């Protein structure tokens, strides 16, 4: 089944609540910059957070010499409502 997610920025509190409910690790990375909500029929079904890892400058420069941390974000947390079918997470990453 193919989903057409609507993606909206979420308030941090709402994102954290969702992550604490559905993610195996409720701790939010400290360098999170964006909280994205994935909606189907106006219902929040998934959350994906973007930010920097533990060594952002070294990470990006090792992969792409010359770039700096402002040039990238990485996924911090990603989780989805348990009722969603198989492969929904892959579609969520693709939509992001």
Image (tube, helix red, strand yellow):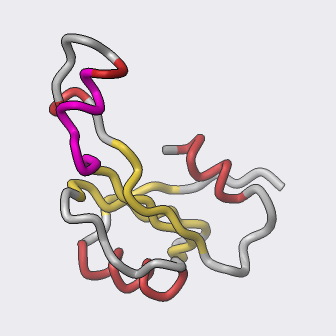
Measured along the vertical axis of the image, is residue 20 above or below residue 95? below
Q: Going 59% across and 71% down the picture, which residue do you hit?
A: 80
Who's the residue at 43% across and 64% down the image? 37
Front residue of 56 and 86: 56
Residue 46 at x, y percent in the picture: 53, 68
Q: Position of residue 23 (x, y in %)?
A: 52, 77
Magenta-span inclusion, residue 51:
no
Vertical side of 30 occupied by 4: above or below? above
Residue 17's place in the image compared with 94, above or below, is below
Residue at 26% in and 55% down = 34
| Horizontal side, residue 29 vs residue 95: left or right | left
Task: Place residue 45 in its image quadrant.
Answer: bottom right
Q: x, y (%) of residue 96?
A: 48, 44
Task: Tell me the residue at 31%/60% (across/down).
Answer: 9
In this orientation, which residue lies closer to the viewer: 50 or 24?
24
Is residue 60 inside the magenta stretch? yes
Callout count: 0
- Expressed as whole percent of the image width and height from the top left, the position of residue 91 reads 66, 49
User: In terms of depth relative to the viewer, which is nearer, 74 or 35?
Assistant: 74
The overriding secondary structure of the stretch rendered in magenta is helix
Q: Which residues are magenta?
A: 52-61
In the image: residue 43, left or right of residue 62: right
Report the residue that reaches farthest toward the top.
66
Q: Is residue 42 left or right of residue 84?
A: left
Position of residue 49 relative to residue 68, above or below, is below
**38 and 53: which one is in front?**
53
Can you say which quadrant of the picture contains the N terminus?
A: bottom right
């Amino acid at each position: 089944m193919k989903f057409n997610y609507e993606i909206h920025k979420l308030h941090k509190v709402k994102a954290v609540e969702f992550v604490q409910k559905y993610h195996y690790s409720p701790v939010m990375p400290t360098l999170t910059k964006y909280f994205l909500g994935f909606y189907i029929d106006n219902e929040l079904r998934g959350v994906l957070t973007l930010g920097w890892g533990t060594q952002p400058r070294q990470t990006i420069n090792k992969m792409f010499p010359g770039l700096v941390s402002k040039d990238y974000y990485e996924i911090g947390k990603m989780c989805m409502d348990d009722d969603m079918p198989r492969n929904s997470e892959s579609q969520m990453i693709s939509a992001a």
